[in-house]
């Protein structure tokens, strides 16, 4: 009897504790989570194309959700490549013969099996879909260390971000020597790292061992924007070092380049990027080049010609002032205008995804929770995906909360960004209150974002005439991953202030 009481009390206490925890959770997490949790059965995410050059190191971790262990396999894998069935990491050297290699990726666990084609295009184009990853700037600034980078790689795996296609772990400014910290280079002119990066090759190898890619940063000028050593005058040697260390991505930031040239003619603007673009093409590994010169000289018109794979179209988002609208809307609206210039391998870059815990770029201070509302964060991510922007999160990887991950990791929203047709959304309508963007997808469907720029809830519509559609369409709510009722003539939705309705419209087959 006494024993029974004890169990009851324990159950009661347990029940109470459970309720109390539930209430506390509800109070702490009032932000609506729209993304459905991925199920236990495998689902393969990420792009369906991968561009690479012949005879270069290849690394690809198959992004897949589902209960582990998952057993991975791939049909049609060229013999130069090998797949680890336990991790889904493909390594090796790309075939020497240019061409298209069509693989079928397979992921299987106790709950089911998923298959997905991946076309590996061996040629001279990289970044056939926008790069996805993380960058250190907006959380670590000049405090960044090698350990932060290793930890970020660990967190990209542990948080599940890598299972949705995030793969670049990119160090921003402040890893070379500061201008007050001589010597800057060794006797042979090789670039030196500062004391916070004691083993940069080991760091890159570590990132690669997780199946992830490593990115770095420098400037064509003598100094980077934060006053560290740049590549100016040592471009060839530095490009070689960057390749030798094993980096896969370079952000090349204009910064002090202006000290070499006194005008900003197009030729002057292009020169340092064409130089680095050519050097990277000759490198013995594939390195994606991100042009960072804030849009000067309409970079979207020539970024690809000089060897860039993506180019910043605006000044730093983290330094932009907000008015009625938060700053991401300003960067986004400006970037949206250049939609015609985008194609696979050449993307407009409206800067990083600043949500979660982010630092203040004006002070370089430590991170604090974003002040953006949940609706604004859904708009931010929707807009970046519709614009086929690089998706580089730059908040704190050590403090990723459930809400932030729900914004970053919705497979159907990310599929809009990663679509292999490689189009940036066209502006269908823009005024003070509304923005409508439409992005054609490879399967013939149309991703449409209805953005409410006003401070009040608002019904927003897009007609088939505006969207270039006919007949019955089924809208799929991409954030909630749900089909809505078939509609004809137009699509309309009530949209919250600064919020979005993101749908994919598919024609009903007759
Ligand atoms: C800016 C750049 C930022 C960040 C910073 C580092 O010019 O736009 O994204 O890289 O330099 O100093």
Image: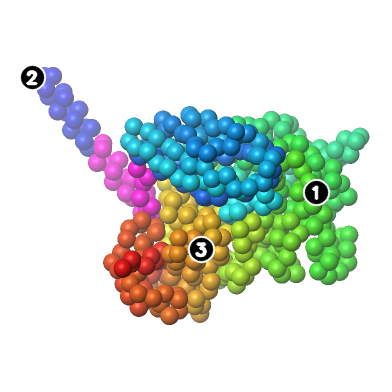
Asked whether 443 or 466 is in front, the reply is 443
Q: Is residue 198 visible?
A: yes
Please indicate whether residue 193 sits to the left or right of residue 248 in the image: right
Q: Is residue 26 magenta?
A: yes
The quarter of the displayed image where residue 389 is located: bottom right
- Which secondary structure, mark 2? loop
Q: Residue at x 60, y 44 (%)?
A: 168
Q: Nearer the viewer, mark 3 or mark 1?
A: 1
Q: Is residue 61 above or below residue 256?
A: above
Q: Percent position (x, y) of residue 99?
A: 63, 47
The quarter of the displayed image where residue 94 is located: top right
Q: Residue at x 68, y 60 (%)?
A: 311
Question: Could you tell me how far apart the alpha carbons at marks 3 and 1 are, in whole angstroms?
Answer: 32 Å
Q: Residue at x 32, y 61 (%)?
A: 483
Q: Is residue 1 above or below residue 219?
A: above
Residue that carries the numbered disc 3 in the rendered image = 386
Q: Residue at x 18, y 30 (%)?
A: 11
> Which is nearer the N-term, disc 3 or disc 1?
1
The magenta segment is 17-40
Q: Nearer the viewer, mark 2 or mark 3?
A: 3
Residue that carries the numbered disc 1 in the rendered image = 279
Q: Is residue 214 above or below residue 374?
A: above
């Amino acid at each position: 009897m006494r024993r029974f009481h004890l169990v009851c009390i324990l159950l009661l206490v347990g029940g109470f504790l459970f309720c109390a925890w539930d209430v506390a959770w509800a109070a702490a997490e009032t932000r609506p989570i729209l993304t459905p949790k991925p199920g236990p059965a495998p689902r393969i995410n990420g792009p369906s194309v991968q561009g690479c050059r012949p005879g270069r190191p290849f690394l690809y971790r198959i992004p897949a959700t589902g209960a582990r262990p998952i057993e991975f396999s791939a049909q049609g894998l060229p013999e130069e490549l090998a797949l680890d069935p336990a991790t889904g990491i493909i390594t090796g050297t790309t075939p020497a013969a240019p061409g298209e290699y069509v693989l079928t990726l397979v992921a299987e666990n106790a709950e089911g099996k998923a298959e997905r084609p991946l076309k590996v295009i061996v040629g001279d184009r990289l970044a056939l879909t926008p790069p996805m990853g993380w960058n250190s700037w907006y959380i670590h600034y000049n405090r960044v260390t090698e350990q932060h980078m290793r930890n970020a790689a660990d967190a990209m795996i542990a948080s599940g971000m890598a299972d949705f296609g995030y793969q670049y772990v990119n160090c921003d400014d402040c890893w070379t020597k500061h201008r007050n910290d001589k010597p800057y280079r060794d006797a042979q002119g090789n670039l030196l790292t500062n004391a916070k990066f004691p083993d940069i090759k080991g760091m890159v190898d570590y990132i690669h061992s997780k199946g992830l890619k490593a990115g770095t940063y420098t400037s064509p000028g003598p100094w980077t924007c934060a006053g560290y050593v740049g590549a100016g005058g040592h471009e060839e040697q530095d490009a070689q070092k960057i390749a030798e260390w094993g980096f896969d991505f370079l952000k090349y930031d204009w910064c002090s380049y202006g000290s070499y040239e006194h005008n900003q003619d197009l030729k002057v603007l292009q020169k340092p990027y064409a130089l680095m673009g050519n050097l990277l093409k000759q490198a013995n590994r594939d390195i994606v080049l991100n042009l960072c010169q804030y849009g000067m000289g309409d970079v979207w018109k020539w970024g690809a010609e000089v060897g860039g794979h993506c180019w910043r179209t605006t000044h730093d988002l983290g330094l932009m002032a907000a008015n009625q609208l938060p700053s991401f809307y300003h960067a986004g609206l400006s970037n949206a205008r250049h939609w015609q210039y985008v194609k696979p391998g050449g993307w407009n870059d409206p800067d990083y995804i600043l949500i979660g815990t982010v630092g203040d770029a004006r002070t370089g201070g430590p991170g604090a929770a974003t002040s953006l509302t949940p609706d604004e964060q859904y708009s931010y991510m929707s807009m970046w995906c519709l614009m086929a922007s690089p998706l580089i999160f730059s908040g704190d990887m050590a403090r990723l909360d459930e809400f932030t991950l729900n914004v970053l990791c919705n497979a159907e929203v990310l599929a809009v960004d990663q679509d292999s047709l490689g189009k940036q959304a066209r502006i269908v309508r823009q005024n003070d209150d509304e923005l409508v963007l439409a992005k054609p997808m490879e399967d013939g469907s149309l991703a449409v974002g209805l953005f409410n720029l006003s401070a009040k809830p608002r019904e927003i519509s897009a007609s088939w005439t505006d969207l270039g559609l006919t007949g019955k369409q089924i809208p799929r709510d991409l954030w909630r991953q749900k089909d809505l009722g078939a509609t004809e003539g137009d699509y309309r939705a009530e949209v919250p202030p600064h919020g979005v309705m993101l749908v994919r419209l598919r024609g009903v087959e007759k």
